[in-house]
Image (cartoon, helix red, strand yellow):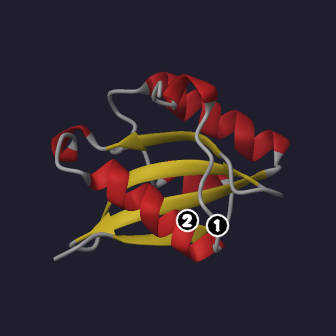
Amino acid sequence: MPISAESHPLSPEQASTFDQVLRDDPQYREKLDAAVAAGGKRLFAAHFNGKRVAVALIEEDRPELDWVVVHPATRGRGVGKDFLRLIGQQLGAILALPRECEQPR
């Protein structure tokens, strides 16, 4: 079964549903909380078999990735790549990556 990507409201309630995904990356839990407080971002989740397996924050007014975290148990399986592709499809644009994620040409 492939993953699906879904947009969610950026709220404290939604943020708490990503605790398992972010368990090994507490700095991103802090970033998620800061984004909830500040606004200006869109929240996306990747789902597999009814469970959230990744989370991403996208800039509110443009198709630019702020950050993405994949659940530790699903890393190395192409989930992040598929997730970003699905987000781009939903946004109708190629998703721009942060400078530190871009590969040299």
Question: Residue 98 at x, y = what percent?
Answer: 61, 33
> For the residues marked 2 and 1, what is the alpha-carbon distance in whole angstroms?
5 Å
Numbered disc 2: secondary structure: helix
The earlier-in-sequence mark between 2 and 1 is 2
Residue 53 seen in render: no
| Residue pointed to by mark 2 | 88
Q: Nearer the viewer, residue 52 or 94?
A: 94
Question: What residue is drawn where x is 40% and y is 37%?
Answer: 22
Q: Residues within 10 Å of mark 1 (few under 14, many from 20)?
A: few
Q: Is residue 8 above or below residue 72?
A: below
Question: What residue is drawn where x is 64% and y is 74%?
Answer: 92
Question: Residue 47 at x, y = what percent?
Answer: 34, 67
Q: Along the horizontal axis of the image, is 27 left or right of 80?
A: right
Give the residue type at disc 2. Gly
| Residue pointed to by mark 1 | 93
Q: Do callouts 2 and 1 mark residues in contact (Cβ within 8 Å)?
A: yes
Q: Quadrant of residue 4?
A: bottom left
Give the residue type at disc 1. Ala
